[in-house]
Image (spheres, rainbow, N blue to C red):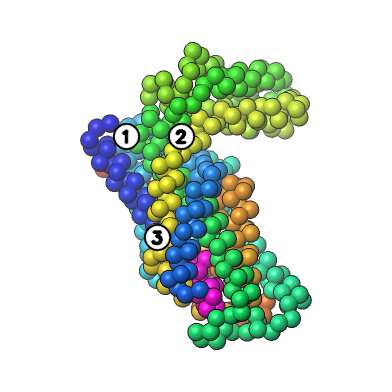
């Protein structure tokens, strides 16, 4: 690694940490607004505890969501040629996401860091297509993520209304439906519920949003140093060779006569990629024994094979039996352990950035969540229902490796809880319009910004 590349890498990693730091203070309100505005915890206690649970969430969250972020851009878009092009991608991605995140925080608008990051990635992919005429976006993965981002706020809104009605049926104590008295803590059992929901939202926020930061760092590492970070180091290759052989055997077993022309071409290429993979892996005991060019080639071939298996071998025209489909899917999962990984130092770095960011700059968004969504002060029941919905929705999304917006899920949960009390007239229309406008504009604005910066930096670099 040259000195210039090292300095550039450190700068990009610092910007990624700042993005995750900003994500922390931008999204802090999602967890602490309810406990602060119901006098359950003091602000300092709330943000420190939330920051710690965000930290724990990232450490224990795995990398499923992170790989979803990485796989939005095909590897060719990251490493198609020189390091300069990787630089253009990285800087465009970081700057566009950070500018939108910090700008919306400054004006106290609950905007989604998830939307900002994903919009920035899509903008680069589209700009790459504009330059090269090659597909720069994994549209299948984009559809999955887009659906989760679209539906999660609607689910949060609807479930919060339902939970409020359940509360009213099951809990007859009127105190939980009243506005908290200034400076007076609620009964212990209410404090316990609200603290527990705050803890869950913080933990699952770390698991979901923290993984997005891990994915962002992996995009940087693969973009700037593709030969080194292309595949997981120190991986035993003997089992990988066996799984590639099994995939190859099942692909040759498929009846090609019933495939479309496009599927036949893809299958033929995947068979050749398997042959290349077996040639690379043969006689290699450890992945670290490969040179940088072969490591990158292995990554490209694994991703190509996995994509073909998903679309062709597991498709409707596949002649494989259900048992064989299950086998080939399991083998692809095994070989993707080489490409779907994140070093432990990356996870720890993002954990610290998100945790520390959670403890800073929380007041602007908290005020919007606590005071400006509904026309009345948030009650204990409303706070609990919103956080129960948020924790459940984000937790399930993390389990399914789908990124969702913590901001939008909890904001919509608060709105649903307010509507459950007095209908839509209980919402402050100005705030709802601002949040909705930010929701609608985040993707197109960040796509335009990142795409434009990518084209500019490609020209400069």
Residue 172 visible in rendering = yes
Answer left or right for 4 relative to 202. Answer: left
Hey, which residue is sitting farthest front in the picture? 188
Query: Disc 2 designates what residue?
Result: 75
**Does label 1 or label 2 sit earlier along the sequence?**
2
Residue 51 numbered tag? none
Q: Element type at marker 1?
A: helix
Total numbered labels: 3
> What residue appears at the point 27 percent right and 38 percent down from the top-left corner?
6
Tell me: residue 118, above or below residue 264: below
Answer left or right for 219 relative to 380. Answer: left
User: Observer-nearest residue: 126 or 427?
Assistant: 427
> What residue appears at the point 54 percent right and 57 percent down from the top-left corner?
203
Residue 452 visible in rendering = no
Expressed as whole percent of the image width and height from the top left, the position of residue 47 reads: 45, 67
Query: Disc 3 designates what residue?
Result: 357
Query: Disc 1 designates what residue?
Result: 83
Q: Which residues are magenta?
A: 24-40
| Quadrant hosting residue 423 | bottom right
Q: Is residue 34 magenta?
A: yes
- Within-10-Å neighbours for mark 2: few <14, some 14–19, many 20+: many
Hey, which residue is sitting farthest top in the picture? 283
> What residue appears at the point 44 percent right and 65 percent down from the top-left corner?
48
Q: CA distance from mark 1 to mark 2?
A: 14 Å
Q: CA distance from mark 1 to mark 3?
A: 31 Å
User: Observer-nearest residue: 458 or 18?
Assistant: 18
């Amino acid at each position: 690694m040259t000195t210039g590349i090292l300095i550039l890498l450190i700068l990009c990693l610092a910007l990624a940490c700042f993005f995750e730091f900003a994500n922390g203070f931008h999204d802090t309100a999602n967890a602490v607004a309810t406990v602060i505005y119901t006098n359950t915890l003091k602000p300092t206690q709330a943000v420190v505890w939330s920051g710690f649970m965000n930290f724990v969430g990232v450490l224990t969250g795995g990398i499923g969501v992170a790989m979803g972020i990485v796989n939005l851009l095909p590897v060719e878009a990251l490493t198609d040629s020189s390091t300069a092009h990787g630089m253009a991608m990285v800087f465009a991605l970081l700057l566009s996401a950070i500018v939108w995140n910090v700008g919306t925080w400054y004006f106290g608008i609950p905007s989604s860091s998830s939307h900002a990051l994903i919009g920035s990635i899509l903008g680069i992919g589209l700009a790459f297509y504009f330059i090269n005429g090659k597909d720069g976006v994994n549209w299948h993965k984009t559809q999955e993520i887009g659906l989760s981002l679209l539906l999660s706020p609607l689910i949060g809104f609807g479930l919060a209304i339902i939970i409020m009605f359940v509360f009213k049926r099951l809990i007859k104590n009127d105190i939980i439906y009243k506005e908290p008295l200034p400076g007076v803590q609620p009964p212990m059992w209410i404090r316990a519920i609200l603290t527990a929901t705050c803890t869950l939202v913080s933990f699952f926020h770390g698991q979901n949003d923290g993984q997005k930061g891990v994915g962002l760092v992996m995009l940087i590492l693969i973009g700037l140093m593709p030969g080194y970070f292309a595949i997981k180091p120190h991986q035993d290759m003997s089992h990988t060779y066996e799984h590639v052989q099994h995939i190859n055997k099942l692909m040759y077993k498929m009846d090609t006569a019933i495939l479309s022309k496009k599927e036949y071409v893809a299958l033929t290429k995947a068979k050749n990629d398997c042959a290349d993979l077996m040639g690379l892996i043969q006689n290699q005991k450890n992945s670290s024994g490969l040179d940088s060019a072969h490591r990158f080639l292995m990554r490209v071939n694994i991703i190509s094979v996995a994509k073909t298996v998903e679309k062709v071998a597991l498709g409707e025209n596949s002649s494989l039996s259900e048992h064989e489909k299950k086998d080939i899917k399991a083998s692809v999962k095994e070989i993707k352990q080489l490409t779907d990984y994140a070093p432990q130092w990356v996870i720890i770095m993002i954990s610290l950035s998100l945790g520390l960011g959670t403890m800073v700059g929380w007041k602007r968004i908290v005020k919007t969540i606590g005071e400006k969504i509904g026309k009345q002060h948030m009650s204990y029941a409303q706070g609990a229902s919103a956080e129960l919905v948020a924790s459940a929705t984000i937790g399930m999304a993390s389990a399914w490796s789908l990124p969702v917006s913590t901001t939008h899920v909890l904001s919509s949960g608060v709105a649903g809880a307010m509507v459950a009390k007095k209908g839509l007239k209980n919402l402050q229309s100005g705030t709802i319009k601002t949040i909705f406008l930010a929701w609608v504009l985040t993707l197109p604005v960040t796509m335009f910004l990142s795409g434009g910066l990518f084209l500019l930096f490609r020209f400069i670099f």
